[in-house]
Image (cartoon, helix red, strand yellow):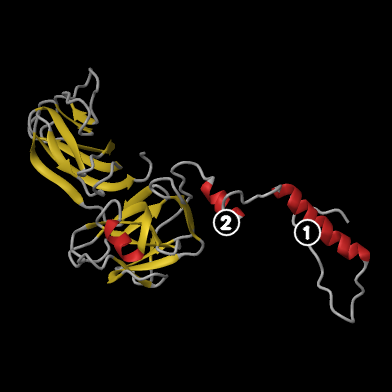
Amino acid sequence: MASSYPGALDSFTTKQDEVDDVEAAHVNALQDSVVAIQTELGLDPAGAETDVLTRLDKSLPKDYLSKYGITVGADTLNDIVFPVILAKDNADSISMRLAASLTKQIDFDWASGSGNGGFPSGLTLTADTWYHIGLVDESDGSIDAGFDTSISFTNLLSDSGGTKFRRLGSILTNGSSQITAFNHFGPLWFWDNPPLDVDVSDQNVTQVSRVLSVPPDVNVLALINVVIQRTGSDTAGIYVRHTSITDELPSFTAAPLMHLGHETGTTAEKSGTMVQAITGTNKVVFTRAVGGASVLRMSTIAWLDNFIA
């Protein structure tokens, strides 16, 4: 019987001594399957690597990161669950594979394995602090995960004994040094309870820096609910931009236009919209108004991470 491989997997029945007759056809079927596998793989399929899986992992494209979703564990305030994942490390030198989900605790010092601590022993868990989360290798080459204030996971690698890492995202502790509730879908991170980042009455025609509730050390695309309210009946508008983009006055007619605005009309008129803006590594965007001083409120709803090289 010819092998079905690689179009399908061959199947065989279990033979028992002194019960089943093993015929030449049975042996031939096994031989056909072996030959089909050898033909598919070719000579020396591992090449210079120790095995085929290692060679396949190293053939992954630059910056590769499989689909993944970070969730909280049974202890929703302190545990993070890392899913099955395959990624290239930050330097694109090795592939990092979690073959099974891994639960790490932010409130215990790092120890290898699921259900153990994931926090660097050289740091102190602090309230209202951002911690990057990601994969690290160990001295024996195995892959684990955890938390670190360092974008390059230097503190966590000091514990694991490895040298490779891949950042997957970031979490924020609350006033009790516990994980602030979030949801994660691919590159998109949502706050469960979005914070009010800006609530001012003095936004004017000069640019002002605004700190948003997004991770530090990386550029992310922030999704921000924005409300403006003019203090009088004059024209009022707002423009939100990345810190490296040219500073220009918002306008109803000239580029770059504006995100939100009112022409002359009702006193204290309000309006709102969602704005997308890339943040600086200091979590900052710039805002600038046209017209008289106006009330400005901004609430970070979500951000896209791991999408900018």
Residue 306 image position (x, y, % from top left)? 37, 45
Residue at image mark 1 = 10
Q: Amino acid at mark 1?
A: Asp
Element class at badge 2: loop
Nearer the observer, 131 or 223: 131
Q: x, y percentage for residue 244? A: 21, 31
Q: In this rendering, would 121 be left or right of 69?
A: left
**Residue 155 tag number:** none
Against 79, is 249 above or below?
Answer: above
Vertical placement of residue 84 versus 116, above or below: above
In the rendered structure, the answer to whether residue 101 lies left or right of residue 271 reads right
**Residue shown at 57%/56% (left/top)?**
50
Q: Quadrant of the C terminus?
A: top left
Q: How many marks?
A: 2
Q: Position of residue 103 (x, y in %)?
A: 40, 68
For label 2, the residue is 50
Kindly indicate the quadrant of the structure image that contains residue 281.
top left
Query: Dot 2, crowdedness within 10 Å: few (<14), some or many (≥20)?
Result: few
Q: CA distance from mark 2 to mark 1?
A: 26 Å
Amino acid under disc 2: Thr
At 70% across and 48% down in the image, what residue appears? 43
Q: Is residue 176 visible?
A: yes
Instruction: In this rendered view, identify the residue nearer to me: 265 or 20.
Output: 20
Q: Work out whether mark 2 precedes mark 1 in sequence or the reverse, and give the earlier one.
A: 1
* Pair 2/1: label in front: 2
Q: Please name whichever residue, 248 or 154, is drawn nearer the observer in this view of the structure.
A: 154
Looking at the rendering, which quadrant does residue 76 occupy?
bottom left
